[in-house]
Image: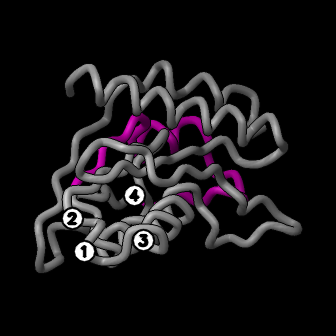
Amino acid sequence: MNDTDTRLLRASLRVAAESRESGRHPFGALVIDAEGTIVAEAGNDSLPPTGDPTQHAELRAVALAFRRLGAEGMAGSTLYTSAEPCAMCSGAVYWTGVDRVVYALSEHRLLELTGDHPENPTFSLPCREVFARGQRRIDVSGPHLEDEASVVHEDFWV
């Protein structure tokens, strides 16, 4: 992980904090294009009772990036996310053409923080395993900054 990765990963943590401050689940994600320009960012919008459970931060960010860039524009893109993409979000990463994922909090560490909370039934399925089943390579870097990324989850899942 280089300095740019650290800066952008911390930016995803800020989006997660903003998501929590607005009353939603504390997750954030952003997508950069091949030139390093932020083309999309999103917080989580899946909090019941009015939220849509498919609106995880990662899925929202990659979908917005795809709408803005198209398939060709997604070449060389990177997703930075406050937590490891779940199986659903990993599928969205794959199908939208993201080439690289950098994440902070691992699924394992997230499960330690959320426990069996009904609003976050965490999979025990690392994104690397999901991507390994695909026909194209997606580079993965993480977990990074897990202690820093954990802060936004403190006292949230009680």
If you read the primary sequence from the N terminus, does the residue marked by circle 4 or circle 2 appear first? Answer: 2
Q: Mark 2 — residue? A: 75
Mark 1 vs 2: CB contact within 8 A = yes
Which one is closest to the eye, mark 3 or mark 4?
3
Inspect the image, locate mark 3, and give the three-letter code of the amino acid beneath it. Answer: Phe
Which one is closest to the eye, mark 4 or mark 2?
2
Q: Mark 3 — residue? A: 66
- Distance Cα–Cα, label 4 vs label 2: 29 Å
Against 96, residue 112 (above or below) is above
**Residue located 73% across and 72% down the image:** 52
Q: Position of residue 79 (x, y in %)?
A: 36, 51
Tell me: 23 left or right of 79: right
Q: Any magenta on residue 15?
A: no
- Distance Cα–Cα, label 1 vs label 3: 9 Å
Inspect the image, locate mark 1, and give the three-letter code of the amino acid beneath it. Answer: Glu
Q: Mark 4 — residue? A: 124
Quick one: which residue is furthest to the right in this view? Answer: 49
Q: Mark 1 — residue? A: 72
Q: Which residues are magenta?
A: 100-123
